[in-house]
Each structure stands twice: as structure tokens, then as C-alpha cells.
Amino acid sequence: MIRKKLEQAKDETYLKGFTMGIMKVGPYAGQKVSEAKPKIKEEMIASNQAHLYFEPESRVVSRTNDECVVASTDQWYLAYGEESWTQAVRDHILDEEKFNSYDPIAQSKYEYTVGWLKEWACTRQFGLGTFLPWDKQWVIESLSDSTIYMAYYTIAHILQGEDNLTGDSSKSPGNIDPADLTDDVFNYIFRKAPMPSGSKIGPEVMEQCKKEFRYWYPMDLRVSAKDLIPNHLTMALYNHAAIWDDEPELWPKGYYTNGHVLVDAEKMSKSKGNFLMMDDTINKFSADATRFACADAGDSIEDANFSRETADATIMSLTNEDEWITETVAGDGGAGIALRSGDDSLNFMDKVIINETNRAIAETADCFSKMHFRDGIQRGWFEMLLARNEYRSFCKDSGIPMHKEAITKWCESIVIIICPVCPHWSEKVWKQIGKEGYAVKAPWPVAGEEDKLLSRQAKFLRDNLKNFRQQAGKAKKGWTKSSVLVTDSYPEWKVNILLMMQDKYDNGFPADFMKQLKVWCKDLPDKKLIKNAMQFASFTKREVEDVGPVAMETALPFDQKAILEESVAYLKSQLYLKDIDVVKTDDVEASADVPDRLKENVVPGKAHLWFR
């Protein structure tokens, strides 16, 4: 494990050194390493200080179990290192509007590959393949012969049809003989060449092919494995740039690459008995639970981990939610519990569940659009369930029925949100709650804009309840009276930090904000405050990133006491307390009995549970 981590660290360091490093000395000082390295190489070869030497990156063993060696042979090469060709591809992958690699590590690998890919041996003298047109003793090797075949996919249903691997013209939907597919025909279909005269292929068929190609191209997304980045995927960019040199808008727009798949954090191996076949996995866990575990396995270029425990847990989770949603929506509350309705009756937690649903809808859509499926199910499933559980407990503990419109919006939204991952479950529940058509064809839920202030209020209640539980566990036996202490004012040193943070904030904090904070803290009159100031600023910075600049206000923009008083029944039930009152320490008369040491523990947004 340590060796693997060291190798990974070395690879990432070398990669960043090449793509991001800057030369410090010599005639190329100031230039990027990726630009200076080939120049230095050519100079050393020209001055006889070096010569070219080739060897495999690692030990290579053939299918006959023989160790392979590098041989110097006559060969045809693709000149991928040609300057204008390379620059065109580099410009394409560096333009975020033209190309999306979905992962910064993958992006750096494309940039690195473009930097070193020069001459590529594109032929061989054995095996299956297409003969090199101008030298029939050579066969085009597979990587060089398979980098724009996705263009053929757009017209294969017209030329070839189904079950026609031999090119039988009688099975061709367009009645096309492969011998009639000349360069002129393909140039008309794929390029801007005029329609060929005298072709045995009808003009209406060629026109249909051209329209199909133009409709489906460019290729928006290609999903492949990370080990193809240094060859096939990058070569496809080069070859698209060569074929459609005058139409860069037809070049691939996005590649998503993934690593290998582990099972329960171990490499799949028949000897270990952890080798999973697709059919067996679906039969054991169901298609939806398998898909869910795959989505949860990981989104990055690193190896993904399929967890059988996750798949098992998903079966129970989907089953439970199927029953609850169906009972709640179709049964008007389920178990005889009526739902209330009317916009004028929305309480604080009704508004919170609607707001949490809106946030989950927007954030899940953003995650899915970026191919971040693990983050997507975290936002669109787990966090949605947590929000519902919190709302359901609040209503039950407060003796208030759930709001029909609020909980129906939640139910309908989660069914559609999880549909890309668990389509069979979504279709079943969609029908059971009385919706027409298919869930997969239903539009994405409409999300109102997230109320950041309401999100902050909900977080205030959630975080303080968590702290209250810890404090209640420390209460001494016989202490029965409890009060929640709140305050609206910060001590002066915290006010000064918030004002400083407001001054530094401009749609985000500067990259060196924490360094600036350390310098600022050196001027504090009480050196004992430095540690507390750093912690407070760091906490506030994270909250700003979560809820926005309102987190830096010197006075809370909401009434803490009102929220807690509306939630007293919920708090008593959750904390197993018979009685709770809310006291503001700012109110001298009301807080006269509160010890000063406890008042010091109370700050805006962080209440304290007082037992006596």
C-alpha cells in the first residue's frame, strides 16, 4: 500500500512538474517545462550530447509468455508532433467551452500527452486490419485505425443495418454495396465536398447519411477508461482535428474517464472469490440497487469501489421509501394521519422542507450534469431523506400534521431526482402515487430559488439540537429544570473579525486569506485571543462558503428565540425533557439568575442548554 502511494505521489509530482513547472535557470528560464524540454532535447541531440533511446515503460510479456524487447524496424509513422497540428489540439483541450474532461487530473493527463506525443508507429505487418492504401505490405494498427469510427456510428444504421457484419448489400437498409463507398462518397457525407457524380449510391441515401452525421456530430461525450488517455482518446482528438481541420466545431466536446472497479475496496480476483459478474450482481441485488452502488462507487479518475454492503442497504432503503411515499401521498398521510393544507398555514419547518427540496433539486442537477453521480445521490437521496426525517420528527413531536403540498413536493421530487440511477423504482412509485406517463419522461422538478437565510435558520436549529444532546448527556441526576440561553450580540473582538472578513470578501475570499488573517491577528492586544480568533474566522469562512455573505453579519438576521420557542415541543421530545424555556442573555432582567460563566459560552447562532 505504501509503495503504491509513493508511486502515485511520484507520478503526480512528475506530471505537475511537466505541465505546471517553470524553468528557473538557463536560456529557457521563465518558460514552462513542457515547452522547454523538447527544445533542450533537440539541442542536445544536435550537439551530440545525447541520442534517442527507446525502452518499454515496464516489463512487457506476450500472450505466449515471452518477454518483449524493443526492435528497430522500418515503419510508417503519424507525425502527431507536427507543430500546428499539436497546437490546434492543445488549444481545443484548454478551452473549457469547447472541451470538458470532467476531472482536473484527467485534464492534466491530456495536456501532458499532447506535450510528449510525437511520432506514432501506425502500421504492422501481421494480424487483422485495413491495408495501408499506398503500401499494401502494411496493416494499419488498431489504435491508429479506430479513432473516428464514432462518425461511422451515425450512418451505420443506413449503410449496414442490423445483423450484417459481412456487408451483405441485400441486408443493407439503403441497398448499398460496400464497394460503392468511395472516398468521394465519404467526403460528401463527412466533409463539405460536392455530391459525387456517377455514384451507384442514390443521392437521397447520401443526403440522408449527411443529415444524420450533421445531426449527431459533434460527439458531446465519450466515456472510456483512464488508461486510454495517453493513446486512443488523445489520438481521436488529433485525427478529428486532421479530418475536420476547417470545422473545429465537429471535434469531440467531452471525455469522461474512470478507473478500475474494486469490490469492497479490493481488486476483483477469482482466487479471492470477490469477482462479480453483471448478471449475478443484478440477480442478487436487483438492477436498481446495483446501479445505486455503482453510482456511489466514486466519480473521479481513481479506482471506484463497489460496496456490496451499500447494495444490500439500498434494497431496504428503496423498499421502505416505496411504502412510505405511497402511503403518504396516495393514502393522505398514511396510518390514518391526515395532512393539513393551505399556504397560509405554512410554519417554519414546512418552509424548511420546501427550501431543502429546492436546494436538493438544483444541486443534484448540477452534480449529474458534471457526471458526479456520488455527489448527486448524496444531495438527491441521502440529504433529501435527512430533510424529510427531520421534518417528520418535528411534526410528530409537535403534534402538527405534515403539510400536504410541502410533503407532496418532496415525494414527487425525490422520485424524479433518483430516476437516472434507480429508474425501475421510480417508475413503480410514480404510478403508485397516481402520476400519468413515465417517470423517465417527466420533466426535472421545478426548483424555486434557495432561501439562503432560511437554510441558515434550519442549520441553526439542527446544529444547536446536536449540541443540546451532548449537553443533556452531562446533566446531573436530579436536575429537572432546563433553559435554552441565546444572545443577539457578539463580543467586540468577534465583531472586529467579522468586519475584517467583510472587507476582504469580494464574491469569495482571496487565496491567501488565512495568511492575511494571521498577519491581522498579530495586532490583537490580547495575544491569548489569537487562537480563538483564527478558529472563529475559519468556522465563519466555511459558513460563508455554505450560506453566503450573510454569515459575516455582526448581528444575526433572524430571531433565534422565536425559532426555538416554535420548536419547544420538538426539542422536549428529542431531548426527553419535560419543560424548556428560552432565555435571552441580552435581557438583563430575564437572565438575572444565569451565571456569568454560562453567558460567556453563548454567542449569536450558538445557544446553550442550562440545567439546574
Image (tube, rainbow, N blue to C red):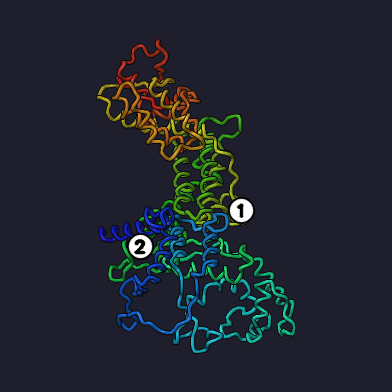
The residue depicted at 29 percent of the width and 30 percent of the height is 473
Circle 1 Cα neighbour tier, 10 Å, few/some/many (<14 / 14–19 / ≥20)? few
The one of 130 and 392 positioned closer to us in this rendering: 130
The residue at the far top in this view is 589
Horizontally, residue 542 falls left or right of residue 333, namely: left
Q: Work out whether 339 lies above or below 529.
A: below
**Residue 386 visible in the shown view:** yes
**Residue 300 visible in the shown view:** no
The mark found on residue 381 in the picture is none
The residue depicted at 49 percent of the width and 89 percent of the height is 137
Residue 220, x across and y down, in percent: 57, 62
Q: Quadrant for residue 270, please give it.
A: bottom left
Residue 82, x across and y down, in percent: 51, 70
The residue labelled by disc 1 is 442
Residue 421, x across and y down, in percent: 49, 56
The one of 349 and 294 positioned closer to us in this rendering: 294
Mark closer to the chain start, 1 or 2 = 2
The mark found on residue 262 in the picture is 2
The one of 234 and 273 positioned closer to us in this rendering: 234
